[in-house]
């Protein structure tokens, strides 16, 4: 079973890229982020024609998350992150797919920091940690996949001082990600690729793609029951090099039966 996460950065603007990747890679489950589309603007028909059922939580202009299942229909179990009824941003969705609970999440960026956006980021991660702990305690097979907007370690960003004040690498942000690992979740990509730099995002500015000046922002975390099933993991970097591409590349894992 192949499970992928992809910050598409505008699902309608990048639809051709998405469909080409789905056809080439044939993931069984896809978690999308940053749809930048309302519920009614989601390209359901095109995705169905590609062989995928979908559930989604849209939002006008920004945010938005979705879960796709090849030759099947995800069963939505949650359309928001619990803990703050006043938070209406479309950043979290859960669905059951083939006996696995899948979450697609798009954590807040948090810039500029310090400030209210960074405070929201940390509060959102606190809510994620509380919910994740509850999911982990169930003992169910669970995948938490998405754009966490956290660079976990210094090796997960190209050598630079330009991000020193960025919310993505602040100690508080890294501590929020580490809190999930301390609960027992497995960072699947790092398990398979334990050495060296891994990048999933390259900013459009300053030729960062051409210079391979990347960051690792997209992560797939596995609960206990799935750890022993982890078979492989990778990043489809070539997608980032396509014309009109997202600034993220799809990140994926495979699970043994």
Image (cartoon, rainbow, N blue to C red):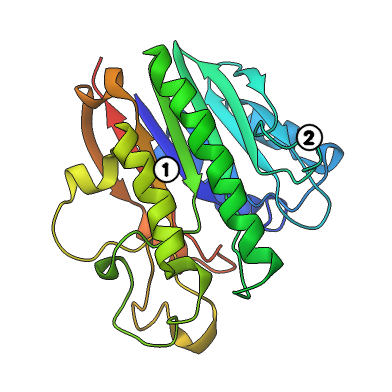
Alpha-carbon neighbours of circle 1 within 10 Å: few (<14), some, or many (≥20)?
few
Inspect this view and state whether residue 50 appears: no
Going by the image, does 196 lie left or right of 46?
A: left
Q: Nearer the viewer, residue 158 or 236?
A: 158
Q: Secondary structure at mark 1?
A: helix
Inspect this view and state whether residue 181 appears: yes
Q: Secondary structure at mark 2?
A: loop
Between the residue at mark 1 and the residue at mark 2, the CA separation in whole angstroms equals 40 Å
Up-down relation of residue 46 to residue 69 (above or below): below
Where residue 85 is drawn, which disc sits there?
Answer: 2
Looking at the rendered image, the quarter that the C terminus falls into is top left
Image quadrant of residue 52?
A: top right
The residue to which callout 1 is attached is 24
Looking at the rendered image, the quarter that the N terminus falls into is top left
Up-down relation of residue 53 to residue 210 (above or below): above
**Where in the figure is residue 208, as x and y percent of width and height?**
43, 81
Q: Nearer the viewer, residue 76 or 224?
A: 224
**Where in the figure is residue 145, as x and y percent of width and height?**
46, 39
1 or 2: tag closer to the N-terminus: 1
Image quadrant of residue 224?
A: top left
Image quadrant of residue 108?
A: bottom right
Residue drawn at 42 percent across, 13 percent down: 138
Name the front one of labels 1 and 2: 2
Going by the image, does 33 lie left or right of 220?
A: right
Going by the image, does 83 lie left or right of 2?
A: right
Alpha-carbon neighbours of circle 2 within 10 Å: few (<14), some, or many (≥20)?
few
């Amino acid at each position: 079973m192949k499970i992928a996460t992809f910050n598409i950065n505008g699902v309608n603007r990048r639809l051709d890229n998405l469909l080409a990747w789905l056809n080439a890679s044939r993931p069984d489950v896809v978690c999308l982020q940053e749809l930048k589309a309302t519920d009614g603007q989601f390209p359901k028909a095109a995705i169905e024609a590609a062989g995928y059922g979908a559930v989604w939580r849209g939002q006008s202009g920004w945010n938005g998350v979705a879960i796709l299942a090849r030759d099947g229909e995800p069963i939505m179990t949650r359309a928001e992150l619990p803990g703050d009824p006043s938070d209406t941003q479309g950043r979290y969705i859960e669905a059951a797919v083939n006996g696995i609970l899948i979450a697609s999440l798009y954590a807040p960026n948090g810039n500029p920091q310090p400030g209210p956006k960074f405070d929201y980021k940390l509060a959102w991660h606190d809510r994620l940690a509380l919910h994740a702990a509850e999911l982990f305690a169930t003992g169910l097979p669970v995948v938490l996949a998405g754009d966490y907007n956290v660079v976990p370690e210094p090796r997960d960003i190209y050598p630079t001082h330009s991000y020193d004040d960025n919310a993505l690498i602040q100690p508080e942000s890294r501590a929020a990600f580490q809190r999930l690992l301390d609960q027992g979740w497995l960072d699947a990509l790092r398990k398979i690729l334990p050495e060296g730099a891994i990048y999933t995002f390259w900013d459009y500015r300053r030729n960062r793609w051409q210079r391979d000046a990347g960051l690792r922002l997209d992560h797939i975390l596995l609960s206990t029951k799935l750890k022993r099933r982890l078979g492989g993991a990778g990043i489809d970097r070539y997608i980032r090099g396509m014309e009109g591409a997202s600034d993220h590349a799809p990140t994926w894992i495979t699970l043994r039966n």
